[in-house]
Amino acid sequence: MSEFMKAVQLHEFGGPAVLKYEDAPRPNADAGEVLVRVHAASINPPDLYLRDGYRSLPPEWRPSPGFPLIPGTDISGVVAAVGDQVSGFNIGDEVYAMVRFPQDLMKGSGAYADYICVPANELALKPEGTDHVHAAGAPMSLLTVWQFLIAVSHEDPNPFQSFQHVPVALKGTTVLVNGAGGGVGHLAVQIARWKGARVIAVASGKHEALLRDLGADEFIDYTCVAAESVVKDVDLVIDAVGGPHMERFLKVIRQGGSLFLVNPLGFSGHDDAASRGITVSSTQVRSHGAQLAEAGRLLSNGTVRVVVDSIYSLSEAASAHERASRGGTQGKIVLTNL
């Protein structure tokens, strides 16, 4: 096996053009790690933030990593080597993972490459019947939804709030998903339905047919009408969009309900929420192989499916980032490396 591989690297922060497809050293699996030959990797918002140098964050939070670095967290591929002290994985196994997140948040986890070393406890067998493209589209989005709605399964400090996030029972409730057409949103619709909720999906009109097919009971085209003007007394709002004016959703939630914010930075409605008896909560998604294995069963049996917006080759990572930056994606953008 060669000491080098192809990878997409950053030598500076900036726009999509700073992503360079080039030779890079091939990693070797240390104890507790598995070397994976990457067949596909998906793009997630943290990839875009890292490429841009996290300019949207307060200055004291911005990274100062050493270059070059390889971005990306989500992969699907085949085990190429197994390090010492690893059990449960063998050469040739098809696997998927969200790699070293958030611990490598500021320096890149290395998914945009031919090979990547993955801690064994972050890895899971690829769901049966799911190809590498769709498996690669799942990990961060699926784990985000799982840890918001099903189980956090860790006790690490929550960087967004002083208390631990606690999922709420969904059976028999009404759940509104804002940003339902995106990577996290379209999976939140499906998981909430699976748990017995009535789901209201909020997205642009082009997503309506898909979201109804995925199980949304009601659809609101936000380009035509504001959700807060036509909805009331929902039990839970999951906002997968973020940005300004997230507090507007407090108006649609019943007293004692909840607002879950995937990206809570900039939320300014805590006092209003307290006066309405509404719990506002967020959490930082974390790599978790056992949860991926559990959630993967829903992919295997068809309860949940990953929607792919577009597919690019690894060498076209800059074009894929340009597509992501335009917004309006339906599901996930995936890089293939076959």
Image: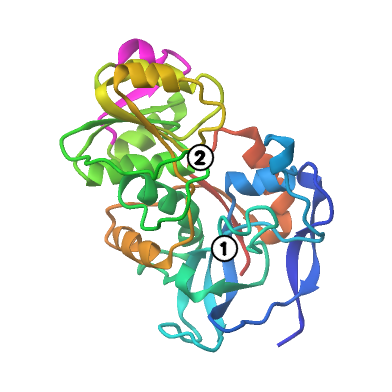
- The correct choice, above or below, for 333 with respect to 60 in the image is below
Could you tell me which secondary element the residue under label 2 belongs to?
Answer: loop
**Above or below, 262 relative to 80:** above
Give the labeled residue for mark 2: 160
* Residue at 23% across, 46% down: 194
Q: Is residue 199 above or below residue 27?
A: above
- Assign a secondary structure to mark 1: loop
Residue 82 in the image: state x and y as whole percent.
54, 86
- Total marks drawn? 2
Q: Quadrant of the C terminus?
A: bottom right
Q: Can residue 200 be seen in this view?
A: no
Asked whether 258 or 140 is in front, the reply is: 258
Res 81 quadrant in image:
bottom right
Q: Does the magenta stretch include residue 159?
A: no
> Mark 2, residues whose alpha carbon is within 10 Å: few (<14), some, or many (≥20)?
some
Give left or right: position of 285 versus 191.
right
- Residue 301's disc number: none
Give residue 85's position: percent from left, percent from top.
50, 87
Q: Residue 100 carries which label?
A: 1
Q: In this view, does 196 lie to the left or right of 248?
A: left
Residue 31 falls left or right of residue 283: right
Q: Quadrant of the N terminus?
A: bottom right
Between residue 64 and residue 49, name the one nearer to us.
64
**Part of the protein shown in magenta:** 216-231
